Image (spheres, helix red, strand yellow):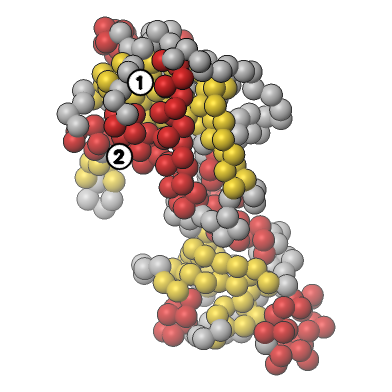
Amino acid sequence: MLNIVFMGTPDLAKRSLQKLHEAGNHILAVVTTPDKQKGRGMKYSMSPVKEYALEQNFTIYQPEKIRKNEEFLEKIQSLQPDVICVVAYGKILPKSLLNIPTYGCVNLHPSLLPKYRGPAPIQWAILNGDTNTGITTMYMDEGMDTGDIILQQEIPIGENETTGELWQRVSEIGSDMLVETIKQIEAKTAPRKKQEGETVLAPMLEKEMAKIEWENKTAKEIKNLIRGLNPIMGAYTYWNGKKVKFWEADTITEEELIVQFPELQEYSYKLKNIMPGTVLFSEEKKGLYIKTKQDILKITQIQAENAKRMPISDFLRGNQIETGTVLE
């Protein structure tokens, strides 16, 4: 078994650390981001990786910076690691660190590189409506996710799968792949190939993108936005001047809407001229239907300001959204 320094931060990384440890590898130390202040009370909270590291009594380092941090680099050098494993650590590593381990630094990245290089590959795969993604392990270099590939595995994305749901699946599949990668490196059988194909970037998500653009987006694009931002921040719109978030939605065509609601048949010729963002149907038992640039968005889970997420039927039981209301 190999001597490993592990670097990571979120749940995805925690699962990989756990699997590496359970496989019998020697975890020399764990490097994670500094504790952050969160919530109204601004209390400090630790990363999921640190939580697990504390449970296992691992040595923990939380440097603010790595580049030109000679003290930290000397500590890692003194450990003489065989491999440094990096999973969603959040920073590009300097050459001075990459050169320390005997077999190099290995990264687990949740996409089929070179597609979706960057910090948000899972989110962008869903935002773009992809039907599949994947996982890559690679030898790290000084670029952003540009190193040579070791192993890759394709993963299908469900039609209604959210970022949170896909994240959980990737955590399990990816952690197993990382363990297998380490086994192959130890056995000196690990493959190594250059990245090929079109490069696509997956930058950090901006808060501004969460606001729904009714006039410019189709129902499918808005559904993908809702899926992609669940549970990170939630896609939102304004109803009567108040922000409401949508957490789950589906799409139907105008023809399917008429089949479901025959009473709208006499108005069907007007549908194409109705402003996107207009509520076409709102009823506790049947749901909330909104006109978009193309097709209809059916909301199934919603959250009002200062309220909890809830099924749309529960929301409409206590809140009346008038047909014809235009959401902003």
Instruction: Please count the marks in the image.
Output: 2
Q: Compared with residue 227, is residue 201 higher up or lower down, i.e. above or below?
A: above
Q: Compared with residue 155, is residue 312 higher up or lower down, i.e. above or below?
A: below
Task: Identify residue for label 2.
Answer: 48
Q: Nearer the viewer, residue 90 or 112?
A: 112
* Quarter location, residue 30: top left
Q: Amino acid at mark 2?
A: Pro
Please, what secondary structure does the residue beneath circle 1 have? loop
* Quarter location, residue 326: bottom right
Given contact means CB atoms under 8 Å apart, are the residues at marks 2 and 1 in contact?
Answer: no
Residue 252 percent location from the top left of the image: 68, 72
Residue 65: numbered disc: 1
Q: Compared with residue 314, is residue 36 higher up or lower down, i.e. above or below?
A: above
Task: Identify the residue at horizontal 57%, vertical 31% (top origin).
Answer: 152
Task: Identify the residue at horizontal 70%, vertical 80% (top origin).
Answer: 257
Q: Nearer the viewer, residue 114 or 284?
A: 114
Residue 170: numbered disc: none
- Which part of the image, by quadrant, shows the N terminus? top left
Q: CA distance from mark 2 to mark 1?
A: 20 Å
Q: Earlier in the sequence, mark 2 or mark 1?
A: 2
Say whether residue 210 is visible.
Answer: no
Q: Compared with residue 8, is residue 326 higher up or lower down, i.e. above or below?
A: below
* In this picture, residue 216 sits left or right of residue 175: right
Q: Amino acid at mark 1?
A: Lys
* In this picture, residue 71 sits left or right of residue 111: left
Task: Identify the residue at horizontal 52%, vertical 65% (top origin).
Answer: 248
Q: Nearer the viewer, residue 67 or 185?
A: 185
Please, what secondary structure does the residue beneath circle 2 have? helix
Say whether residue 250 is visible.
Answer: yes
Residue 300 percent location from the top left of the image: 52, 72
